[in-house]
Every structure is written in structure tokens, then in C-alpha cells.
Image (cartoon, rainbow, N blue to C red):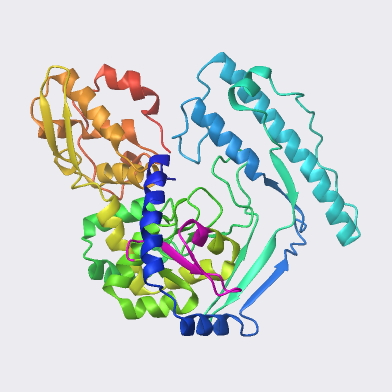
């Protein structure tokens, strides 16, 4: 998930790319006819209601409205940057009271939705299934919570997901919408979105991976960091259109964000620039393009109208054929190479320049790699950069340590790399990853670091 400030940047990019697109249309009339003809072939796209007899086709799902409310609630109490897999902690007795009510209401709303699902499933299968365990309503929300975050919406819905099957000439892909989220997941936005984790990098033949890495100019050490971070995301062919990334693709989930460009747009642009012929084969001939400034273009396959930026996002989310184009491309080497190149240029933190001034007026500056010398250290910051858009906390921690220890040379911070990792890990503490090179234990941990991040020591993500 990327921060809102980067979303604003993506929106600015959309303005520029739209102008460029209007001056030089990417899809010609002949292109549009050929693309529509391809997708109109019998059996290319089939949508049918889910028919899961084990669980029943009707199911309980988190409501997007509740997910947005949870995000705003977390953000207002200063915990909006918590990893998606974790619940933000309560910071006061009042917040603990709110949390208790929210947890109880989530359970009650899911119970009510499960009763509705049971009714529909029983009627459909002409059977009598066991009743769900009763849950008591916690009553009206606390007025203090309503004043703080607004009236909470219903936390769960009863839905009937649909299965979407897309058939290319060389493979068939399938997705189910209304993705099943954790009950308090704060990033769910589009019930018609879909996802597929793809094939994780560790499950691809090592020789195949090595060949792609070499083609992208990625060293063995950098590759180990990539692999460590991507274990928490997916494969080159992973796709996701249900959350705040809007359209997210690839081994570190390159996201279009609200502007319809950002890192995903840059990945497509890199691919098109480096390998235009394979880009045409993998994307353009199916209805996906990119402007010269890195904004998505998606063809509305029904009307033949090109959609740009935010409108392209909406078109891809709605039409599962278009997100399948990304997954198909991710199973071939050329697009994998483009992903690796963009990942290194945008997110690998080793060459990022750091500069700050201590309270005593000492100015320190250098590269991240002057301090974070091991694979565990670089993976820690890359995970933060990929998922929060920034490594600002590294600068904050570096300043705290420099002031506490009277450090006057930026490179001397390297002896505290172990401290940085334990304090700054985001989704996973890479100190515990035996597959990565590790720093020596720090001589000590400054008490200022412990007061700021001490609760993270000894924990893993």
C-alpha cells in the first residue's frame, strides 16, 4: 500500500499523460477492430455464479464501506501506517473501549450476514444446514466513537461471488470476485475486483529465474533481497484489483494507484521502451497500452473507447479480461525483466541519499548502503519503501542514534545496523531470515530507540 502523497503525484501524472494521449492516440481504428474481434471469439470470456457446494455459493464478505471507515478510523488515531496484516494497537483506555465495541460489532454483522447466506444456500440446494453460532449485538456505537470517526457502516455483507474464466490461445485463467478479506482489513475497496497470487518466485525453476535476473542486470545479492521481499507479495504474474492500489501487478505489486500510473505505469513504459515488439504481443494486441509519461490506457472492449489513467483503472477492475492480460504477460521472460528493472530503480534503497542535521549542528550525509550493508538491512528498507513509499523512519532513527552516541561520521552508524532492522521492520523482521546476510549485534541499543521502538524487539512480523 502506498501513501496518499504518492497518490497525489500519480494524479498529476494523469493530467500530463491525458494531454499526450489526446495529441497522439495509441490505439488506431484498425487496432480497435482487431482487439474487439479477438475478444469476441466464442469462449474467450465466460462469467458464471460461484457454485461451491462445500461452502455454498452465498457467502459472508467484508463490506467496502466498512473497510474505508476502518482506514479513516485508524488514520485519525495515527495508526494508518500499520502493516495490512496487523491490527493497530489501542493507545488509550478510550481506544480500547472502541476496539472492544468494533470487534463485537464485526462478529455480530458477520453473524447476521451468515444467517442470510444460510437462507439463500438452503433454498438453492433444498437442504437444511446447521445454524451458525449465535452472536449478541453490542448495541449502538459509543457516541465518542461516532464523534471521532463517524457512524460505522455495516461491517459484513452476504454476497454471491462470480467466477470469471478468460481463455487465451495459450492458457486459460480464472478469477472469483468479492474476494474474501480479513474481517477488519482496512484496504478493501472494490467488490468486483479479483486477485491471484500467481507463481511465487521461489516456485519457479532456479535456472529460469537466474536467466531473467541476468537479463535484468540484477546481482545475486540484490536478487536475494528481491526474493525475501516478494515472498510477502506474489509472483511475476500476480494480480490484484480489489484494494487501494487499484490495479496491482507483479512480484512486488507494482500499483497504478488512483491516478492510473505510478509504478505499474512505469513498468509498462519500461517494457514498451526496451522491447516494443514483445510489448505489442503481450499487451497492446489485447487492449492495454501506456502513454509516453507512464499512464495506463485500457480499451473498453464493448464500446471500443480508450480509457486513460483513473478511467483505465475502472475499466480494468470491471473487465476481468484486461487484468488477465497482465497475469499472462507475467508468465513470460520479457515482462519479468521489465519488472525487475523497475523494481531496482524505484525501490531498491542501497543508493538512496540520506542527509540530516543533529541537534548539535552536525550535518551527516551518505548512501543507505554506507549504513545498511547486509541483505537483511536492505530487505528491511526495501519492504518499507515498496509498501509505504518512504524510508523516512530510517532517517529519524539515524538521527536519534547519531545524537545519542555523538556520531560525527555517517558511516559510523553502520555498527548499529542490527538496531535499525529490529526497530524499523515493517511486515517481517529480517533478522530472523537465515537466508540473508546479517549484521553483527550492535554494541548497545540507545534508550531513545527503545522508548520509540522498543516494543518491536524480539518480535517477528
Please say whether residue 299 is one of the residues in the magenta stretch.
yes
Q: Residue furthest left?
A: 409
Tell me where residue 392 appears, x and y as whole percent: 29, 34
Vertical relation: 112 (above or below) 92: below
Report x, y in % for residue 240.
51, 57
Q: Quadrant of the N terminus?
A: top left
Q: Position of residue 457 (x, y in %)?
A: 36, 28
Q: Quadrant for residue 160, please give it.
A: bottom right
In the rendered view, does 363 fall on the left or right side of 116? left
Quarter residue 5 falls in: top left
Front residue (pair 232, 91) = 91
Residue 73 in view here: yes
Residue drawn at the location 64% of the way across and 38% of the way down: 66
What residue do we see at 54% from left, 43% from top?
A: 187
Residue 224 percent location from the top left of the image: 28, 55
Q: Residue at x 11, y 35 (%)?
A: 411
The residue nearer to you, when weighing 401 against 306, is 306
Q: Is residue 170 magenta?
A: no
Q: Is residue 360 above or below residue 32?
A: above
Q: Is residue 169 visible?
A: no
Direction from residue 398 to residue 203 in the image, left or right: right
208 over 52 or under it: above or below? below
The residue range painted magenta reads: 292-313
Q: Residue at x 50, y 80 (%)?
A: 32
Amino acid at each position: 500500500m502506498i501513501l496518499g502523497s504518492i497518490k497525489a503525484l500519480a494524479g498529476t501524472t494523469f493530467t500530463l499523460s491525458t494531454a499526450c494521449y489526446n495529441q497522439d492516440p495509441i490505439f488506431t481504428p484498425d487496432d480497435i477492430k482487431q482487439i474487439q474481434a479477438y475478444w469476441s471469439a466464442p469462449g474467450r470470456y465466460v462469467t458464471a455464479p460461484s457454485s461451491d457446494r462445500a461452502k455454498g455459493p452465498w457467502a459472508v464478505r467484508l463490506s467496502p464501506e466498512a473497510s474505508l471507515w476502518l482506514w479513516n478510523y485508524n488514520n485519525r488515531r495515527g495508526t494508518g501506517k500499520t502493516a495490512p496484516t496487523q491490527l493497530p494497537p489501542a493507545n488509550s483506555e478510550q481506544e480500547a473501549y472502541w476496539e472492544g465495541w468494533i470487534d463485537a460489532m464485526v462478529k455480530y454483522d458477520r453473524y447476521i450476514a451468515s444467517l442470510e447466506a444460510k437462507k439463500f444456500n438452503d433454498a438453492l440446494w433444498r437442504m437444511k444446514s446447521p445454524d451458525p453460532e449465535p452472536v449478541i449485538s453490542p448495541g449502538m456505537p459509543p457516541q465518542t466513537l461516532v464523534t471521532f470517526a463517524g457512524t460505522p457502516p455495516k461491517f459484513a455483507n452476504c454476497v454471491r461471488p462470480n467466477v470469471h474464466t478468460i481463455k487465451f490461445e495459450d492458457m486459460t485463467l480464472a478469477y472469483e470476485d468479492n474476494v474474501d478479506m480479513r474481517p477488519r482489513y482496512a484496504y478493501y475497496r472494490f467488490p468486483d475486483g479479483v486477485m491471484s497470487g500467481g507463481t511465487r518466485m521461489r516456485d519457479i525453476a532456479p535456472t529460469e529465474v537466474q536467466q531473467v535476473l541476468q537479463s535484468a542486470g540484477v546481482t545475486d545479492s540484490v536478487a536475494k533481497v528481491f526474493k525475501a521481499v516478494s515472498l510477502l507479495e506474489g509472483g511475476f504474474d500476480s494480480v490484484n484489483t480489489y484494494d487501494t492500489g487499484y490495479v496491482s501487478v507483479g512480484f512486488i505489486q507494482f500499483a497504478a494507484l488512483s491516478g492510473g500510473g505510478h509504478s505499474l505505469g512505469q513498468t509498462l513504459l519500461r517494457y514498451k521502451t526496451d522491447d516494443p515488439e514483445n510489448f505489442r504481443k503481450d499487451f497492446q494486441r489485447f487492449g492495454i497500452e501506456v502513454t509516453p509519461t507512464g499512464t495506463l490506457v485500457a480499451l473498453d472492449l464493448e464500446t471500443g473507447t480508450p480509457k486513460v489513467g483513473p478511467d483505465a483503472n475502472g475499466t480494468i477492475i470491471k473487465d476481468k479480461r484486461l487484468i488477465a492480460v497482465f497475469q499472462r504477460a507475467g508468465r513470460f521472460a520479457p515482462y519479468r525483466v521489465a519488472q525487475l528493472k523497475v523494481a531496482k530503480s524505484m525501490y531498491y534503497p542501497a543508493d538512496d541519499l540520506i542527509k540530516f542535521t543533529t541537534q548539535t549542528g552536525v550535518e551527516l550525509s551518505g548512501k543507505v548502503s554506507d549504513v545498511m550493508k547486509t541483505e537483511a538491512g536492505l530487505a528491511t528498507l526495501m519492504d518499507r519503501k515498496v509498501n509505504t513509499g518512504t524510508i523516512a523512519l530510517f532517517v529519524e532513527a539515524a538521527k536519534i542514534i547519531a545524537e545519542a552516541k555523538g556520531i560525527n561520521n555517517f558511516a559510523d552508524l553502520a555498527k548499529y545496523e542490527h538496531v535499525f532492522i529490529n526497530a524499523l521492520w515493517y511486515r517481517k523482521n529480517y533478522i530472523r531470515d537465515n537466508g540473508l546476510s546479517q549484521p553483527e549485534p550492535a554494541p548497545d541499543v540507545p534508550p531513545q530507540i527503545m522508548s520509540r521502538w522498543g516494543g518491536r524487539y524480539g518480535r517477528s512480523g
